[in-house]
Image (tube, rainbow, N blue to C red):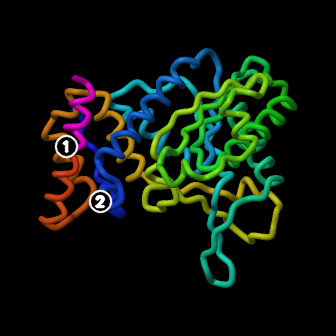
């Protein structure tokens, strides 16, 4: 089997297990596999899947798995930085999220770039939105703006939605926005929505997410989308991709050399930390083995 790539940076696996049990992680990966099936079910023709940064990416990574192990979705993922970004001001690093008018510009820019790069004909292009859900505001806004932009570009007004809804107890107890409730209940015309309950174990955890950077002045709106750049968290991408493939591949899950190299690739660690990680990984493997019996 192909061994995982050793990359610099923090130990993302250790960061993951500090706050997430093997059982909760297994539920996240199970959800990602359901997302994978939902994507595959409608990968027909030219399809763009809008994935708002940063929260959607762990779901994407886990659903797609390792490129050397699993076939990748035929869809084109359009990463749109409409969530939190960081910038420098007065010598300090600050963070914020774009206002709605800027989200519209960002989505328009990203969809235009995707159509240009792929050569897809707008009238023959299917469009879909995949995102995590806490209260649902970001997803419902992304869907509404995507439909408006797609319509102006001559694309189909039909927008499929895959909502990875956070199933952690404290989040489930929070009220969802009215627009999201309409989405989730399939009450919006031409917007079939698949809700996938799963614990969103990477939410608001910088070590497990990409970083979106704004170059230049925060209050300069000229060429705003072009000044947003994504610093890919390669170690987190490798982590979630590997965990996704492990869950769906019995042979890989029982390849001791692969598992050892996967753990070692996370970076140097003491004996105590190594033993804790190995025990956690074995527990995760045992859960997944029982699920496939």
Query: Dot 1 surroundings within 10 Å: few (below 14), some, or many (20 or more)?
Result: many
Q: Secondary structure at mark 1?
A: helix
Which one is nearer the viewer's eye here, 138 or 253? 138
Q: Which residue lies at the image location 17% right of the left edge and 52% below the top edge?
A: 278
Q: Residue furthest bottom?
A: 90
On screen, residue 71 versus residue 47, left or right, reads: left
Q: Residues within 10 Å of mark 2 (few under 14, many from 20)?
A: some
Task: State the image coordinates of residue 204 (x, y, percent, origin top left).
Answer: 52, 59
Q: Which residues are magenta?
A: 282-293
The residue located at (35%, 54%) in the rendering is: 20
Residue 68, picture quadrant: top left
| Residue at image mark 1 | 259
State left or right for residue 220 relative to residue 185. right
Residue 267, given in percent of the width and then of the height, sits at: 25, 60
Is 292 contained in the magenta span? yes
Task: Specify the quadrant that holds the N terminus.
Answer: top left
- The percent coordinates of residue 100 (x first, y second) are 80, 53
Q: Residue at x 70, y 27 (%)?
A: 186
Q: Which mark is residue 14?
A: 2
Report how far apart the C-alphas of labels 1 and 2 lie in the structure: 14 Å
Q: Is residue 201 magenta?
A: no
Task: Please tell me whether mark 1 or mark 2 is closer to you in this view.
Answer: 2
Q: Residue furthest right?
A: 152
Q: Is residue 212 above or below residue 291?
A: below
Q: Is residue 232 left or right of residue 19?
A: right
Is 276 drawn above or below residue 164 in the view shown? below
């Amino acid at each position: 089997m192909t061994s995982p790539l050793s990359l610099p940076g923090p130990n993302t696996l250790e960061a993951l297990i500090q706050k997430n049990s093997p059982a909760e992680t297994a539920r996240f990966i199970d959800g990602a596999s359901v997302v994978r099936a939902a994507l595959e079910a409608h990968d027909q023709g030219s399809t763009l899947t809008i994935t708002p940064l940063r929260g959607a990416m762990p779901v994407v990574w886990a659903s797609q798995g390792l490129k050397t192990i699993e076939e990748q979705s035929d869809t084109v993922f359009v990463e749109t930085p409409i969530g939190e970004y960081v910038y420098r001001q007065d010598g300090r690093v600050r963070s914020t999220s774009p206002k709605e008018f800027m989200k519209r510009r960002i989505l328009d820019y990203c969809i235009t770039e995707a159509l240009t790069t792929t050569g897809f004909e707008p009238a023959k292009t299917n469009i879909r939105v995949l995102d995590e859900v806490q209260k649902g505001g970001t997803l419902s806004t992304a869907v509404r703006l995507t439909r408006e932009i797609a319509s102006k570009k001559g694309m189909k007004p039909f927008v499929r939605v895959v909502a990875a809804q956070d199933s952690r107890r404290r989040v489930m107890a929070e009220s969802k926005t009215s627009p999201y409730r309409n989405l989730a209940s399939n009450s919006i015309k031409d917007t079939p929505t698949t809700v996938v309950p799963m614990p969103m174990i990477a939410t608001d955890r910088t070590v497990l997410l990409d970083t979106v950077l704004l170059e230049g002045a925060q209050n300069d709106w000229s060429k705003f989308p072009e000044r947003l750049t994504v610093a890919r968290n390669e170690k987190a991408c490798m982590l979630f991709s590997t965990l996704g493939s492990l869950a769906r591949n019995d042979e890989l899950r029982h390849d001791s050399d692969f598992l050892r190299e996967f753990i070692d690739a996370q970076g140097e660690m003491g004996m105590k930390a190594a033993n804790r990680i190995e025990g956690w990984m074995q527990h995760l493997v045992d859960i997944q083995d029982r699920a496939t019996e």
